[in-house]
């Protein structure tokens, strides 16, 4: 196998794995019985996006996506905190 063929195969495997994971996560967001299930699933989806960006950076050997990854991570953290505070207030 040539290096280009192996690279294409690796990209295909990565795309399939993340597509399946994203589809299952979206199902959990839509179906998930509680708001906490949906919040956790949205965090998982954001993490999957971060992993896809990281894999793309490794494959293409650059670091231009790091600021985008930091913004996505911050949105995930603040979203989780907001949902946790909302649920805590609602349960009182």
Image (spheres, rainbow, N blue to C red):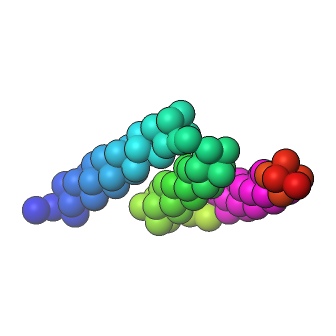
Q: Is residue 22 above or below residue 68?
A: above
Q: Residue at x 85, y 48 (%)?
A: 90
The C terminus, quarter of image: bottom right
Which residue, as the protein is rendered here, is positioned at the far top? 30
Q: Main secondary structure of the magenta part?
A: helix
Query: In the visual, does 4 lie left or right of 36?
Result: left
Front one among 79 and 90: 90
Which residue, as the protein is rendered here, is positioned at the far front? 92
Q: Position of residue 66 (x, y in %)?
A: 68, 62
Q: Residue at x 82, y 53 (%)?
A: 91
Tell how many labels: 0
Q: Is residue 75 above or below residue 1?
A: above
Find residue 33 and report its image quarter: top right
Q: Position of residue 37 (x, y in %)?
A: 59, 50
Query: In the visual, does 49 lie left or right of 90?
Result: left
Which residue, as the protein is rendered here, is positioned at the far left? 1
The reply to whether residue 4 is visible in this rendering is: no
Q: Residue at x 35, y 45 (%)?
A: 20
Q: Position of residue 81 (x, y in %)?
A: 81, 59
Q: Which residues are magenta?
A: 64-85
Front one among 10 and 42: 42
Q: Residue at x 33, y 52 (%)?
A: 17
Q: Is residue 11 above or below residue 19?
A: below
The reply to whether residue 69 is visible in this rendering is: yes
Residue 13 included in the magenta stretch of the image = no
């Amino acid at each position: 196998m040539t290096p280009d063929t192996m690279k294409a195969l690796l990209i295909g495997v990565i795309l399939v794995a993340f597509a399946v994971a994203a589809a299952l996560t979206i199902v959990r967001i839509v179906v998930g019985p509680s708001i906490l299930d949906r919040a956790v699933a949205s965090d998982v989806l954001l993490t999957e996006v971060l992993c896809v960006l990281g894999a793309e950076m490794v494959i293409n050997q650059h670091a231009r996506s790091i600021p985008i990854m930091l913004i996505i991570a911050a949105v995930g953290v603040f979203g989780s905190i907001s949902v946790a505070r909302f649920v805590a207030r609602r349960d009182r």
